[in-house]
Amino acid sequence: MAQKKIIKVNAIKHGTVIDHITAGKILKVIDILNLTGDNSVMVGMNLASNKIGKKDIIKIENRELSKQEVNSIALIAPSATLIIIKDFEVVQKSSLDMPEYIEEHIICPNPKCITNSEEIPSKYYIHNSKIATARCLYCEKKYLVEDLKIKI
Amino acid sequence: MKNLISMRDLSKEDILHLMDVAAKIEKGEIVPNMQRKLAALLFFEPSTRTMFSFDTAMKRMNGDTIIMSGTGNTSAKKGETFADTLQTIAQYSDIIIMRSPIEGSARYAAEVVDLPVVNAGDGANQHPTQALLDMYSIIKTQGKLDNLKIGLAGDLRFGRTVHSLAQAMAVFGAEFKFISPSFLQMPEYIKDDLTEQNIKFEEFKEMEGNIDDLDILYVTRIQKERFADPEDYEKVKGSYVLNKTMLGNVKKSFKVLHPLPRVDEIHTDVDDTEYAYYFPQAKNGVYTRQAIISILLGEV
């Protein structure tokens, strides 16, 4: 019975699966995707993974992600895999690439930055070395990517 | 070069070209003519020296200026956006030179208007024209910019001048001594930048005993207005004072620079020594700013 239940949960007809999310980051991913609509959402946390040790996973029915959403998720979970499902078939499977540049979706932590006093989008350049960092185009401050607050 | 926003945008070649133009302007080999050109000086934060220096630079080239100082006489209080203020001023002038406490404001201004924009200081971020006049002073006194040993002393945390200068001199392979109270140390993001470029730096808590091997000692004021708590200011005030007795074993070509205004961090007994260069440095600011304006307006 238990086996059957798992299969039922796993199956989505159309939608998106984000696999290999760094364990513990799923809540940030949910926050980015603003999952308040009618879509069915399945979440797995702290699952064993051959690829990254421990992983989180999310499956969202009837939802395709925008480029901006994918970029934002790549910032917090660069090891993730994006899978697009149509008619129960995997039609696309790709690993996320950390973007080199991201506009609008990072809230600059510097309260004196102009992006926090004028209605203008933030612009960040990402430097993906051993520890990923991001630099604000405007105030030029550099932050660890994992410390940044991301909004959609 | 369309705008001058940050030292990070300038290549070594850009800097050397600018130094060359400033030197030619000083010697009278280039005489830029800014007749009928108008610079808008927008100073949303108090400044006397930088504003006067730009005003002088423009007027020495037969140009003119319109000046807005403080926010009291703008439409910002009526609810006008910063972008609209800039767009309007841009209709009157040929170049915008601005200072603001908001970091990134000059970068944003350059996106909004079609005119050249010069950053005359944006919060604790950048002050590129100061860095360039400092470099002009260094090249004049040392004959080169490459491979110098530079001490930066005072408020290294909030002082945008030292941030811009450290980044710019790093391009020329400088070695640094950072001398400051622990509360006012050079920010990590600047030190990270230097480490990435393999630039050597050491940190010290006192001036005495750490200046004999330097080519340049750049002293900055502890800026009272940067402190939230006046007690923090009192704790460090006056703890970094350079005086004449400390100059006994310095290099012959050693020079002391300071962006001014000075409070008590350089004793007046240093003024009469061959090492004091802070007043000529202020004059160099005019030549450097003449060069910047001339290059941005395509006059040289």
Image (cartoon, rainbow, N blue to C red):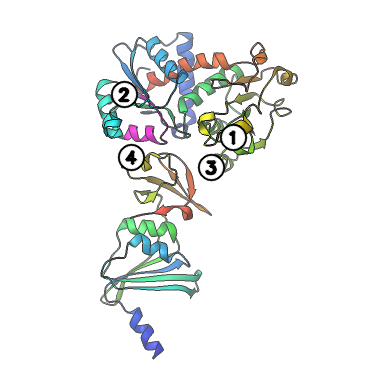
Q: Nearer the viewer, mark 2 or mark 4?
A: 2
**Residue A59: image location, x then y, percent:** 35, 72
Give the residue pinned by disc 2. Answer: B73
Task: Determine the image quadrant of residue B242.
Answer: top right
Give the residue pinned by disc 3. Answer: B189
**Residue B55: image location, x then y, percent:** 39, 15
**Residue A2: image location, x then y, percent:** 40, 88
Check residue B291 in the rendering and tell me which mark sits there, or answer none.
Answer: none
Q: Do labels 1 and 2 share a chain?
A: yes
Chain letter of the residue beneath label 4 in the structure image: A
Disc 3, SS: helix
**Residue beneath the point at 32% across and 62% down:** A34
Real-space CA distance between mark 4 and mark 1, rounded to the nearest whole angstrom: 33 Å
**Nearer-N-terminus badge (1/2):** 2
Real-space CA distance between mark 2 and mark 4, rounded to the nearest whole angstrom: 20 Å
Real-space CA distance between mark 3 and mark 4, rounded to the nearest whole angstrom: 24 Å
Check residue A118 in the rendering and tell me which mark sits there, or answer none.
Answer: 4
What amino acid type should be assigned to the residue bearing mark 1?
A: Glu
Give the camera-side residue of B220 and B192.
B220
**Residue beneath the point at 36% across and 54% down:** A151
Real-space CA distance between mark 1 and mark 2, rounded to the nearest whole angstrom: 33 Å
Give the residue pinned by disc 1. Answer: B231
Real-space CA distance between mark 2 and mark 3, rounded to the nearest whole angstrom: 36 Å
Task: Determine the image quadrant of residue B154.
Answer: top right
